[in-house]
Amino acid sequence: MDDLITRLKALSSAEDFLHFFGVPFEERVVQVNRLHILKRFYQYLHRADDLAGLDDIEMFRRYRGFLVQAVQDFTISNAQREKVFKVFQDAQGQQQVPLSKLRASLADRRAA
């Protein structure tokens, strides 16, 4: 398992992971959702409680399955619906700013 983990640490992009695991993907989907896919992959890994003690081959298979599922999530859905990142979890992706805060900010800018 250490060999697999070492090899994974050298990967940096979603495309690197997809190529390493041999996962077919639509370039358009990955270009738009690369961070979401990697975050979902990470979430799947951390939810799995039965990975300890697996050999490299079985670990590779399990990781690949999680990555396939992460890509599939964003192939059939989108970032707003999947809500992987906090910005989409809070208030349906909309941030509320009170008018008083905007006025105060404007006053500060005029004073500067």
Image (tube, grey):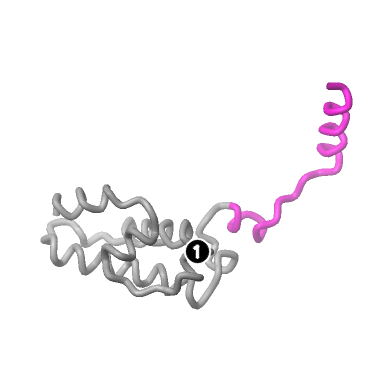
When asked about the image quadrant of residue 70, the answer is bottom left
Q: Which residue is mark 1?
A: 31
Dominant secondary structure of the residues highlighted in magenta in the image:
helix
Q: Nearer the viewer, residue 75 or 105?
A: 75
Q: What residue is drawn where x is 30% and y is 65%?
A: 19
Q: Residues within 10 Å of mark 1 (few under 14, many from 20)?
A: few
Please state the horizontal and vertical placement of residue 83, each as a whole percent of the image.
Answer: 54, 62
Residue at left 32%, top 60%? 17
The kind of residue on which mark 1 rests is Gln
Asked if 98 appears above or below 106 in the picture, the reply is: below
Q: Residue at x 58, y 57 (%)?
A: 89
Q: Is residue 22 left or right of residue 70?
A: left
The single residue placed furthest to the top in the displayed view is: 112
Image coords of residue 78 (percent x, y): 55, 70
Q: Position of residue 2 (x, y in %)?
A: 14, 50
25 or 2: nearer the eye? 25
First to last magenta residue range: 87-112
